[in-house]
Image (spheres, rainbow, N blue to C red):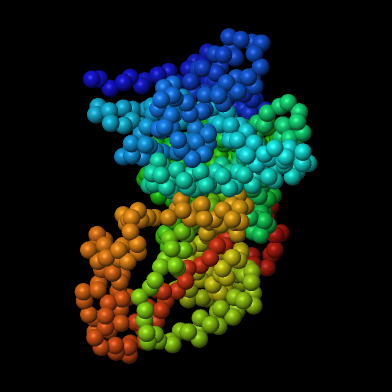
Amino acid sequence: MNAPFVELPFDAWKEPSLVIEGTHSAQEICSLKFMARFGRPLFWTVMESTPSIDQEEVVQYAMSKLELRLEDTSRDIFCKFPLQKLIPPLSVRVDLSFELNRDEAVFLEGLLVASSMRTVYSVPKHQQYFRGGYPSEPFVAEAAARAIFTWCHAKGLGRTGSTLPPAEQIEMIIATYKTNIPSAISQWLELGLIDQGTREELVVRMLCTLAHDIAILKNPDHEHVNAVLSGVSGDVSFSQMIRVEDFLRALISEKYIGDVLDARPSNLRGEMLRDAFKDGYVHFTQFVKAGDKSTITDEAIYLLFLRAAAIQGYGNMASTDFVIPVWIPTNNSQYPDRWSMSAIFIQVKNRVNKQFIPIDAQETFQFFTRPQMQNGRKLPYITIVMELGNLAAEQKKAPQPEVKQASTVGRTKRKGQQAQRKKNPVQVSMPANPTAQRQTRETTKQAKMPVATSPVCDTVQRIPPPTPADVQVISRELPQTTRSQALHIHPRYEIAIKGCSSLVYNVIGDEDKSHYSNILAHKDMLAEHPRSEDRVEAVRRMKPYWVAPSSYHWAKMNKESRLGAEVVIADNNNNDDDEYYENTNEEAEEDLVVVNGYSDTEDAGAGDTDAEDVS
């Protein structure tokens, strides 16, 4: 039997070109009529063929198609999933990928194709499964966002919440977003429906989507939200552009957002982030996959901005996992183009001490078409490292091989550092002074290393390690930048977020950390073993994989070791080894946010008087 034909028309509009650069205003880009031209021709043809139809009715029609339905009601027993009303719209918004080796997951994805507008990209010859997804269709993404809001509105307010003032209603709805969306995805993962190989990226897509929607709901100028909550007929539009500051405020906790907005560029002297992006906007309701490096350019970012899409990185793109388009109007123009586009680059980590790769948009991707804007300013960009750190938490809980006679060498130094950290809860490094040029070669090398990945941030003053749950604004030692060189440098604002809890993310509720821990947990092959832990230990001794101390019970060592094996002669005269074992068992850092700043040794005392040279 031949495989089904899936090659169908897409991006087929009444005109050969769907867009022309520089001719579409910000207001037009956010309109339903503009969004309907992308993707399948279903929605724009309905609007064109029936001029009298209300565009909101077309959105309601799209929302009705984002539901799980079975024409054969006798098979309803197979369509029972937790919070299943959220499956289609969340599949659109956060790009859920389903397991190919689970019958339930294959059935669910087929059901989404049959009833919920999911697209089939390819069916292999064996036809055991298919490759599908939700392509870039801003109209469908807008319908999905409204479907999620409708569900959270009903769930959060219930029968009595609608009588509360609008501000209280919004908080109740936002709390429903924060709790139920990660809970739903956690449950679907637990059932084996979602591909577990994309957990970290899935969490980031969910965090950014929550921040986007919550920023819309918290915007006091959004008349649609107030109209809906006041009982006036209307619909909330989630395709409106959001100020960069509002997006960051929704994403990052109140404890740290002030330090983030006050950050300065890490690669040259410049203004604070809040000033550099005061006119910047993000505009995305969906994530699309990048196929190659050409997607990470201002030309492609501009075109994806028109489609309200953010980018997921491709496999070979080592330094960046996500790119969120940012529009910074040039000369107050309301018509975006490639020369007014910047971005937020996001790098994801879920490993202890995983290598941090600095993101240089121009050097790595040649992102910007030209080095400066029409008025002489360089377009700034933001880099965020999200170190989710779930494995650090798991290792912190896991039993470690005991070292009975640990060396005291180095303990005094560490205790002194701990006391200094308690004395100074928020560490902010001072600008480097001219004498820094006389530091040793090794210290210079350490000072130039990326600070986001090390518990000790080396600057000229050698500030102490960061206290858990504290902010650091770090000045890194970099070569002096001349005015002519600065003209070709785009200001880079570096942020590192460690952890995945309400302490650092504003979109995570105080009681919802467990949902993210469940999503991020790397479960081994014995996670679903049906019997007690002592039986699991017996299986570990069969060595399906090697882990301490279970896999080394059969050996005796002549010295204490990290394997937890039995010791024949405990001769611990080597203090250096004991200190190393002690260091390897130290607890992982807790959640915090680090902001990197630039320091010019020659202009350390100049303050901000030269800011105009590079801003």
Where is residue 182 shown, x and y percent of the image? 53, 47
| Total marks in image | 0
Q: From the viewer's perspective, tell me whether residue 558 is left or right of residue 599.
A: left
Q: Is 478 drawn above or below residue 80 in the view shown? A: below
Whole-percent x, y for residue 436 in the image: 56, 73
Taking the spot 27% from the left edge, 65% from the top edge, the residue there is 538
Residue 343, placed above or below residue 137: below
The quarter holding residue 325 reads top right
Question: Along the line of sight, which residue is nearer the eye, 330 or 77?
Answer: 77
Q: What residue is shown at x 60% (from left), y 49% (from top)?
A: 507
Which quadrant: the N terminus?
Answer: top left
Residue 419 rendering spot, x and y as whole percentages: 59, 80
Residue 339, quarter of the rendered image: top right
Can residue 457 be seen by looking at this rendering?
A: yes
Left/right placement of residue 164 relative to residue 262 reads: right
In percent of width and height, residue 514 lies at 52, 55
- Image position of 449 (left or right of 419): left
Residue sitting at x 26%, y 83%: 567
Q: Residue at x 46, y 59 (%)?
A: 390
Q: On the picture, is 472 further left or further right than 166?
A: left
Image vertical order of residue 437 relative to residue 20, above or below: below
Q: Nearer the viewer, residue 483 or 399?
A: 399
Regarding residue 380, the answer to whether it shows in the image is: no
